[in-house]
């Protein structure tokens, strides 16, 4: 996770078009307005206005507190874990190591939000986890994630860019490794979706306009350019450029729900950014990670929560790493069911990056976007508003 800027400025105030009274604004505005404590606009004495806005603690301070807490908790727990078992420093991509490695950031995020939420007078579930039918959305996300990843693997096989070998596991080993990897990737999904599509997407939605989003993305790109390291950094630059014009037009037109999409631009770019530290990544794989992150933001918009994204994310990684045995973001796992090997031009096979590094990922991401829109996109935002109001009243 990229470090926030050293200074935080007052939060952007909602425009009349983004107010909670306009039900046609949709679910994103409900999350950025309905779920936060209301307050009458008034002049705060002294410097209070610098820290508190009409929605409570300003988004910039909220994120800064969250990040500092997460950093401290993760470092402390990581130090303790290494003291107990120094072998954890070996970075072996096994289900046991993955479970321990993801449990630390999961607990750190949970601890940070558990402190920030009461300060903001919210519950942990308020951060994009309170939408309707969470169990249904999670299970449908699992199904779509496995199906779409399978379509990608099938396309690679059909084109001759991926070859299957012998089955690597059977019997007890197949069940044990399958279950362990399922738990590990559920934690991966909870960590990554919990930080990007839950906390950050919710918080940035209530505190960003185009200019602050542009400043944040510019800082990320400048950091990559100055460090001149990281794998596939052009993938970050591409996703940043793709979002530039649409988000600017939303800002100029004062488009409905613009703050949600400005936040999605930032969180998706950051999601690609964190993957540049993985070994074996190429620019296509980094771009794919960011693009899938944007699709997950769309799923939050149309389903009312991040549960679909959590399920899809977990199933995608499980199918890719365990079931088909391909590389996952440049990482080759121990204990996979099938055995596969890339073949041919890296642009099409993905090479060491795995299926996500192939050009075929682009139509597959569009397929994933189409799936979420077909399944849920026809539901009117006002219906989501009504559902949320009914849940609050209950």
Image: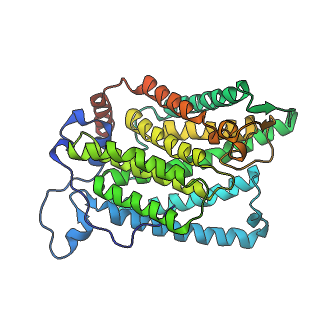
Q: Which residue sits at x=77%, y=64%?
A: 90
Which residue is more in the foreground, 261 or 64?
A: 261
Q: Looking at the picture, does residue 148 appear above or below residue 106? A: above
Q: Is residue 338 left or right of residue 2?
A: right
Q: Is residue 60 visible?
A: yes
Q: Residue furthest front?
A: 345
Residue 107's quadrant in the figure?
A: bottom right
Q: Looking at the picture, does residue 246 appear above or below residue 236? A: above
Which residue is more in the foreground, 369 or 102?
A: 369
Q: Looking at the picture, does residue 375 appear above or below residue 189? A: above
Q: Which residue sits at x=21%, y=51%?
A: 14
Q: Is residue 124 visible?
A: no
- All told, the count of numbered labels is 0
Quadrant including the C terminus = top left
Q: Position of residue 49 (x, y in %)?
A: 20, 68
Q: Residue furthest left?
A: 42
Q: Residue furthest bottom?
A: 46
Residue 316's quadrant in the figure?
A: top right
Q: Is residue 151 left or right of residue 121?
A: right
Q: Position of residue 362 (x, y in %)?
A: 55, 34
Q: Is residue 176 left or right of residue 152?
A: right
Q: Position of residue 69 (x, y in %)?
A: 48, 68
Give the colour scheme of this rendering.
Answer: rainbow
Q: Position of residue 156 (x, y in %)?
A: 69, 30
Which residue is more in the foreground, 295 or 134?
A: 295
């Amino acid at each position: 996770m990229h470090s926030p800027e050293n200074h935080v400025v007052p939060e952007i105030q909602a425009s009349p078009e983004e107010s909670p009274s306009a039900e046609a604004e949709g679910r994103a505005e409900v999350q950025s307005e309905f779920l936060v404590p209301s307050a009458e606009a008034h002049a705060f004495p002294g410097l209070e206005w610098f820290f508190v806005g009409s929605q409570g603690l300003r988004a910039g301070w909220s994120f800064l507190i969250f990040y500092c807490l997460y950093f401290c908790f993760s470092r402390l727990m990581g130090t303790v874990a290494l003291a107990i078992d120094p072998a954890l420093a070996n970075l072996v991509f096994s289900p046991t190591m993955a479970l321990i490695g993801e449990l630390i950031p999961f607990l750190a995020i949970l601890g940070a939000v558990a402190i920030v939420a009461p300060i903001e007078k919210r519950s942990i579930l308020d951060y994009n986890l309170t939408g309707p039918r969470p169990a249904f959305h999670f299970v449908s996300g699992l199904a779509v994630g496995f199906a779409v990843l399978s379509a990608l693997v099938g396309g690679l096989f059909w084109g001759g860019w991926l070859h299957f070998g012998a089955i690597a596991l059977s019997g007890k080993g197949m069940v044990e490794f399958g279950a362990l990897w399922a738990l590990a990737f559920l934690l991966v999904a909870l960590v990554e979706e919990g930080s990007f599509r839950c906390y950050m997407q919710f918080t940035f939605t209530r505190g960003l306009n185009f200019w602050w989003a542009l400043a944040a993305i510019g800082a990320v790109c400048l950091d990559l350019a100055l460090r001149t390291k990281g794998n596939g950094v052009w993938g970050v630059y591409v996703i940043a450029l793709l979002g530039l014009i649409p988000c600017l037009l939303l800002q100029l037109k004062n488009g409905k729900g613009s703050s949600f999409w400005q936040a999605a631009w930032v969180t998706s770019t950051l999601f690609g950014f964190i993957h540049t530290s993985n070994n074996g990544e190429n620019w296509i794989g980094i771009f794919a990670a960011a693009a899938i992150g944007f699709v997950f933001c769309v799923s939050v918009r149309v389903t009312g929560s991040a549960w679909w994204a959590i399920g899809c994310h977990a199933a995608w990684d499980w199918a890719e790493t365990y079931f088909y045995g391909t590389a996952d973001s440049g990482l080759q796992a121990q204990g996979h069911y099938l055995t596969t090997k890339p073949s041919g031009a890296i642009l099409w096979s993905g090479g060491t990056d795995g299926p996500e590094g192939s050009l075929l990922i682009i139509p597959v991401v569009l397929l994933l976007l189409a799936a979420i829109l077909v399944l849920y996109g026809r539901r009117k935002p006002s219906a989501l508003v009504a559902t949320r109001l009914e849940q609050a009243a209950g």
